[in-house]
Image: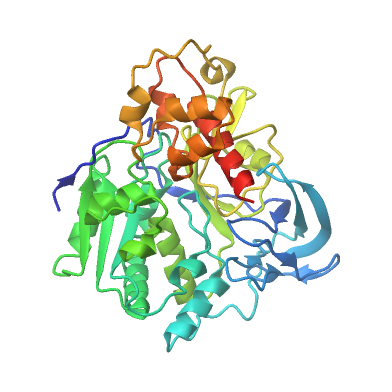
Amino acid sequence: MGLSRHLKGVHVKHSKNTAGMPIIPMPVPERVYIPMVQHIGAPCTPVVKVGDTVKVGQLIGNSDQRISAPVHSSVSGTVEAITQGMTQYGRVDTSVVIKSDGKQELLDTVLPPEINSLEDFVKAVRNSGIVGLGGAGFPMSGKVNIKPGEVDVLVINGAECEPYITVDHAVMLSYTQDIIDGIRAVMKWLEIPQCHIGIESNKPDAIARFNELLAGDPAIKVHTLRQIYPQGAERVIIYETTGRIVSYGMIPWNVGCIVMNVTSVMKLQHFLRTGLPMVSRCMTVDGNVVLHPQNVDVPIGTPISDVLEFCGLKEEPKKILLGGPMMGRAVPRDDFAIVKANNAILCFNEAFAQQRKETACINCGRCVAGCPMGLMPAKISRAFKDKDIEALKELNVLYCMDCGSCSYSCPARKQLNFEIKQAKALVMEAKK
């Protein structure tokens, strides 16, 4: 397919320092701290108790809610504690602490699922524990739990437009056939006739690899996307690959689409082939204080400090980000545990992380020009400061995807994205 374009977005420095690097398995940590909240949706409740012996792939947390994903042990060992404490999401949640025995013994009942119907497929996806691995963390079972033929396009997100992060690129090169097989499984059981894979043009080797393996398959098309942020946003990549517009108040299903991340589909295929649920997370570790930037495969629940010790640090980081510099979250310390939705750890020194002083808005309109959703960030900011709920609704503040393009493009260095997040919370509270 030709080079796609959309009208808005920002050009960011890619800084893909780990591009082309393989994914290195991390050593088994001494302890894992596995939170029961690792996704959008209902939290899980522990199904193990202190003193229990567990193995890799064993269920340790579950929920009976529709939008949720079970949690499994990433190591073999003994449940040492079930604690309440602050997680990387800034709230107090339950975590299961497991002391590893170093053996990584696999649970005996880990076997490939038998699938003979859509119901079997949806159940298998649920049992896999997979969530969206592009950063949002929406349980995959919630996406596939639909009627056959309800959607006609599967969109696969291989854009990876955030600076620094290259793990999806590495997955596309190392597990191309697994991704294709996972795509075909989803298309088969959901009766989806066509699939569009969107990959930014700065990954020509991945594009060539997919085109080579998909030659002669008209149902799966590869799109070369322009290098602009945020190409990987759900609404943006749907438009880029299909031309369909997900308007305000709509979700992808409303325009006949489902969007899945390439690593999510790869993990799904691994589960269908082996029966091993999601117990590890491929992620990029980079930043100007990281000694050996690389892509690593990390057991879920591993403390950030263990990952940084494995990669090495040149100096103590001033800022630690989980995710990319545009949409990632800064965390105050390095003892938080890695969860399924984490795709990167970025560490920077004080000079790099220093925030520039704000100046007055000059009404230049760059925030409007950069917003992929066509919003007016400066007006939203003023309405937020005035606590004008009706104005915020009229400005469609809830349509904001928190991509940060407005803050990035603002010459006055105003924290527009932060204010818009608060404005969205204000509107949501008013709705309650």
Residue displayed at 35% across by 74% down: 150
**Residue 399 in the image: x percent, y percent?**
43, 44
Seen from this angle, which residue lies furthest front?
Answer: 390
Seen from this angle, which residue lies furthest bottom?
Answer: 116
Judge by depth and name the residue closer to the eye, 235 or 124.
Answer: 235
**Residue 231 in the image: x percent, y percent?**
32, 43
Residue displayed at 45% across by 49% down: 23
Judge by depth and name the residue closer to the eye, 229 or 320.
Answer: 229
Count all numbered tags in the image, as a single digit: 0
263 vs 8: above or below? below
In this image, 121 relative to 199: left or right? right
**Residue 345 in the image: x percent, y percent?**
55, 38
Judge by depth and name the residue closer to the eye, 339 or 98.
Answer: 339
Residue displayed at 49% across by 35% down: 391
- Residue 425, image quadrant: top right
Can you see residue 251? Answer: yes
383 vs 430: above or below? above
- Residue 154, image quadrant: bottom left
**Residue 370 in the image: x percent, y percent?**
33, 30
183 vs 235: above or below? below
In this image, 300 relative to 174: left or right? right
Can you see residue 11? Answer: no
In this image, 369 relative to 296: left or right? left
Residue displayed at 74% across by 61% down: 101
In this image, 253 relative to 239: left or right? right
